[in-house]
Every structure is written in C-alpha cells, then in structure tokens.
Image: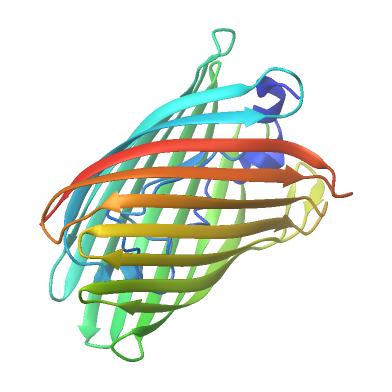
Amino acid sequence: MNARTLLLTPWLLAALAAPALAQVAAPSLLPVNPFVDAASYYTALDFVTLNPAAMQWGAPSRIGAAALEVTRDEGTGSDLNFAGEAYGARGVWERFSLAAEASSVKDDEASFDYTQDTTFYGLAAQPFGWLALGASQYEAKIDDGGNATTDTIGAYGVSLRLSEMFFVGYTSGRETLDSYQLTEKVSRDVRAFGVGFRRGGSFNVHAEYYSFYRAPYKINGGYRAKDQADVGVLELGLGSLVAGYRAFRYENKSDSEKSDGQQVSLAWAPASGFTLGAHLATSTDKNADGSKKADEEVRTISVGWQF
C-alpha cells in the first residue's frame, strides 16, 4: 500500500481525531509528552489532556515545542516518511487552567502533496479540592493534493482526586468527520475512563491505566464497529530527571486489526526553567490473521520552559 492509498482509506481518516494516548485520570510528569501516529496522522504534545479535567492537577505551568520525524514501513520496499513540528502552552492556577497546542505535519515524498494541521484547546476548573471539570475542542484539517478533510471532536470531562495520590477520570464527547470521500458528514460518540496514581516530592511517580472507546457508526453505507485502545503508563522522576514508558494496544472490532506499541521518554524537567526531552515510539500494525501489516517509528525532540 502506498502513501496515497493509505490517505484515502476512510476508516483511517475517521481515526484522525482520536487522541487516545494522552492522560485521563492524572497528568504526565513529562513537560512535553508527544504522541504521533502516522496511520491516523494524529499529533499531540499532551498540553491538552485527553480528559481536559486532568489538566488541573498538572502544575507547574509550561510552554513547549517539538520537532518530529516519522518512518512507516509497510513492506513495499519503500518507507513512508513524514516530518513536522508542534508547540503548545498550559497555564495552571489554583482553581482553573487553560491550554492550547497546534501541529503541522507534511510528507517527505516529492511525488505527494499532503499536509495536516491540527489545533487543540482545553480548559478546566476546580470547584472543590477533590473535583476538576473540563472541556476541550480538537480539529484536524487535512489537504491531500487539494482534497480536503476536516475532523473535529468536542469533549467534556471530570477527574476526581480520591486522596493525595489516587485519581479517577472520565471523559465523553462527539466526533464529526467531513471528507471529500464521504457523501455526508458522519459522527459518533467517544469516551474514556482511567485510574491513576501520582506522587510528588523528591521522587515522583505517575502510573495510570485507561481505555478509550469510539462508538459504532456507518460510513458510505458500510458498518464500522467499535474501536478501543488500552493504555498503560509508568513515569518516574528523580530530581529534575524524568523517565517515562507508555504501552498501548489498539483494536478495531469490525475487522480485528490490532496495533501494539510503546514509547520511551527521557527528559530534563526542573520545577522551573528550561526543559529538554527525547522520545522514541515504535509500533506494529497487525492484520486480522495476526500477520504484520506495518512497522512505525517516531523520533521526537522536545524543548520547553516551566514556571
């Protein structure tokens, strides 16, 4: 399958607004926590969390940017290569927080003309010490040789701080896809639930598990079953050094295709001042029979400032 065929696959286009690998219960310890998926062309830095309410537990405030390279090997003898940049900011105060981020990704193939630009906004409020509420809006605009696709998702979320270190979170929203490939707009419900542990101090720990669901819908007369992603996170911080590991499994219930992957991160992240991070993500897409469909590698360098 070449890049053009990949971009024209409707169910992959429907995945464009699937921020499945950001945080749900509690925020990351990493100052910039990138996620890039070449199959769905989704890019995020986690300034706006999947559950926008979780941002409220994410002090200190920060700004950041990242440069990324993506290599996708589909076994055709010619890799697909993409490059881009992303940037964002998050402000966290005693009772509310605001965040915004944007990204731009382009193909590195001279024979193709593809760009994908995203924006992501979120806000959260803390009416009680144990409760945070949030809302977010995500939009991806894709230009594939003059053919346009727009994917949006609006979401609301809640995060409960059950004790000093234990959190639970839930978010739900509505995804809408408008593409030149479709006869009409399609939409469906999305939701996520997670439980997390986050400990501060001289030795920081963040552990979390969450699931992300997208409801069934019909697209161009064909039935598309529920999608699900299960994610596990472990992050450790000692002084200004933070190491992170994230493992995930994605499955489409209609065709039984799966994707298994992981990301490792290492960052310098003092409570205030300059931050620097290196991130490597690898994943394997599998067909319904278990055979390999594609390998993907994402290399990201991030910088920022916490205050």
On screen, residue 188 above or below 101: below
* Image quarter of residue 99: bottom left
- Which quadrant is the C terminus positioned in? bottom left
- The quarter of the picture where the N terminus appears is top right
Residue 203 place in picture, x, y as percent: 26, 73
Residue 147 visible within the image: yes
Among all residues in the image, which is located at the extreme top? 110
Q: How is the image coloured?
A: rainbow
Q: Nearer the viewer, residue 216 or 207?
A: 207
Judge whether 145 appears above or below 104 on screen: above
Quick check: can you spot residue 183?
Answer: no
Q: Which residue sits at x=33%, y=56%?
A: 48
Percent position (x, y) of residue 244?
Answer: 41, 58
Of 200 and 168, which appears nearest the observer? 200
Report x, y in % for residue 188: 62, 58
| Residue 251, position as x, y percentages in the image | 72, 57
Residue 77 placement: quadrant: top right
Report which quarter residue 204 is drawn in.
bottom left
Residue at the far bottom in the pictured view: 163
Q: 4 or 295, which is in the foreground?
A: 295
Q: Is residue 262 left or right of residue 138?
A: right
Determine the residue positioned at 45% across, 36% down: 299
Residue at image position (23%, 79%) is 126
Relative to 149, say whether 130 is above or below: below
**In this rendering, would 172 be left or right of 98?**
right
The residue located at (81%, 45%) in the rendering is: 221
